[in-house]
Image (cartoon, rainbow, N blue to C red):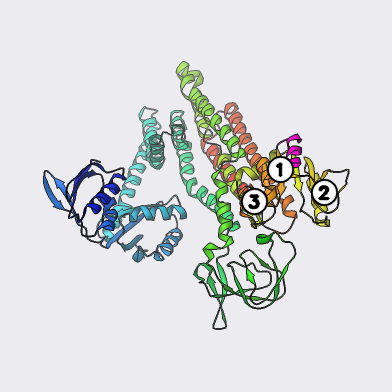
Amino acid sequence: MTKKTFEISNIQSTEELNHLSLKLNEKEQVSHIKIGKDSIVFYCLDIDALLSLIQSINKDLIVKEVVDGKKRQYDFAQKKERSYYFMFKNMITEDDIYVLIERIEKDDRYQNVRYDAQNKLLLLTSSQRDVLSLLRKELFKINPSIEIIEHHRPIRSQDVFNEKYLHTYIRIGILLVVIALALVTSRDQSFMTPFLWLLTVILLGIPLLRNAWRDIMSKKILSESLLIFIAMVFGVISGAYIETCIALGIYELSTPFLNKVLEHSLHKIDTAVEMPETGIRIKDEEEEEVSLYDVEIGDILLVRPGDTVSIPGIVEKGVSEMSTYTNTSTYTPVVVKKGSLLHSGDVNVGEMPLFVKVNETYKSSNYMNLMNIASVAPVYESKTEKYTKILAKFYTPVMVVLGLFLGIVLPIINFEDYSSFIHVGAILLIISGALSSDQATSLGMLAGFAKAFQNGIVVESSLGLDSINAAQTIVYDRFDGVEVTNEELNLFKKLSHMGRTFVIYNDGPVALEDDQYQIYNNLTNEEKMQKMDEMVSPVVYIGDTFKDIELLQKSYVGISRGGLADPKVVENSDIVLIDANLNRVYETFVIARKMRTIAIANNILTVSMKVIMLIVALSWHLVPLWLIVLIEILLKAFVIRNSTCILE
């Protein structure tokens, strides 16, 4: 795209001139700026991107485009609404389209949203310049396989037919003719037979070829789409004409199936970390269920026994007991009454309902803080994911080289003896695609975070939850000045049976002695740090207060069990426990272990199935291609499904 020349005139003052020139200098697309007495001339790619900037300085400024020395005034008029017409590709069910419509109807940027079910068209009006791009992003969240395209002229039923169906029918007609000719020439065993079947594979694999081309343009040479298409070509060369076409058809039909499996798994994860979105508001002494985002300061919310306070506020009416552990790290319930201040995260553990007058918005509540903390975890790649990707990185090139060697090199050396290996080469290329456990491992990590979140365990770093499995020593720092309870003794017993060295730092009023554990009574922070240096690493440290921050930082994995009471403690922890139940400490280890076990099981299953298919292909050259494709698809679906079984 070439840059154009523009002039800004009618600049009222020197200050305005300097301010405007500085702002233009900050824009990368602007160059060759020349400043006059009351005008600025410059080059830029897209003047539309600068309009808001220019208007914010002075709406009376005049912008002109300079073409061959002539100046044409640029239209500064407000964006005008226009009608848009959209069609959809790869749409299997209209349910996803109705979800999209429901979302954009709530968006002020779109008006007159309407879906023409007969012609499968989405119609709307908008003043936005990038409507197609915005809708594509929204639709991708709903169903990545559906493609939306814009029709640039008013739609008639005849246009829709020509656009959507006629081209498809022509391709189907050509495909049927080619298949018929291929079947007829099969008896003659002429060169036309493999040529026509190869043409059939190309016509059937047009979507696959498009994906392969996009991957090549993105420098993904060993993409699955490209490898599968080469495998289908090998299948035709080996003489397996019909089974190759069946295998290609099964593969292309698998895309919506696998998308549904993936969508189901992601939905389970989303449900597990779903934040409360509705509450009971009291208005005119009537109860009404409302969105928490619509609750305003001053509204009265009902908090029944067992409910958690979603939005901070002051008790307007009622008396009950509240668990405030999440915000205060205090285990003992607090009696609240009219005038008492409640925070989001407090739980009504009493027997009476409370009427709370909110004094903040939902977006500023601790629930939102929790979600922000939890949302950081997937950013970092866990060790299990890294190992799986390393395995996949070496696996695919090795299988591709072996497949190309069997399918190309050996037949060139001696075609009569090795022609059957072309079929084996096709099988190896099919199973050479990226390990299905690669994607499943990432899903499994997310499922582990979600399971932890369900149990009041907020994972601040994905490395934290996964790295627990590598720990050799567990250090439990007891609550300061608190006597040992039966709940703590049960926790000690469980942690000591985790297969690691278990150490207790006791700061309680009574010294502890027990031959089963390593116990250190009343150590200073410096002494604790020194003892930690002597322990077998990696070390998991479990603390709760501000004085434990240095120990949390020093440990391999830092777990704070003090809720959200101290932001500094939360900031320096890998995992934060927001539940008053001490057993959550043990559950953190259990979830981490189960998460890793599922990932390892998926990897073992995937590699084992690949090895079995490789052995079968080498020992039985005539194994059908469609069977290999089917096994690959079912294997992918199973490991994706199995990756989220921790949530069941």
Residue placed most toward the observer, 253 or 155: 155
Task: Decide which of tag 1 and tag 2 comes sooner along the chain.
Answer: 2
Please report the residue visible at 15 percent of the width from the left and 46 percent of the height from the top: 66
- Residue picked out by circle 3: 569
Task: Decide which of tag 1 and tag 3 comes sooner along the chain.
Answer: 1
Residue 493, disc: 2
Task: Give the residue at the far bottom of this rendering.
Answer: 284
Asked whether residue 619 is in view, the answer is yes
Task: Decide which of tag 3 and tag 2 comes sooner along the chain.
Answer: 2
The relative height of residue 446 versus residue 156 in the rendered view (above or below) is: above
Residue 598, disc: none
Q: Nearer the viewer, mark 1 or mark 2?
A: 1
- The amino acid beneath tag 1 is Val
Task: Give the residue at the far front of this rendering.
Answer: 14
Please report the residue visible at 17 percent of the width from the left and 46 percent of the height from the top: 36
The answer to which quarter of the image holds residue 584 is bottom right
Q: Position of residue 635 (x, y in %)?
A: 58, 42
Measured Cα–Cα span from mark 3 to mark 2:
26 Å
Residue placed most toward the observer, 615 or 76: 76
Q: Position of residue 202 (x, y in %)?
A: 38, 37
Please report the bounds of the magenta region as a residue range: 525-537
Find out whether the residues at labels 1 and 3 contact each other: C-beta distance under 8 Å.
Answer: no
Q: Position of residue 253 (x, y in %)?
A: 47, 46
- The amino acid beneath tag 2 is Lys
Q: Is residue 97 found left or right of 124 in the rendered image?
A: right
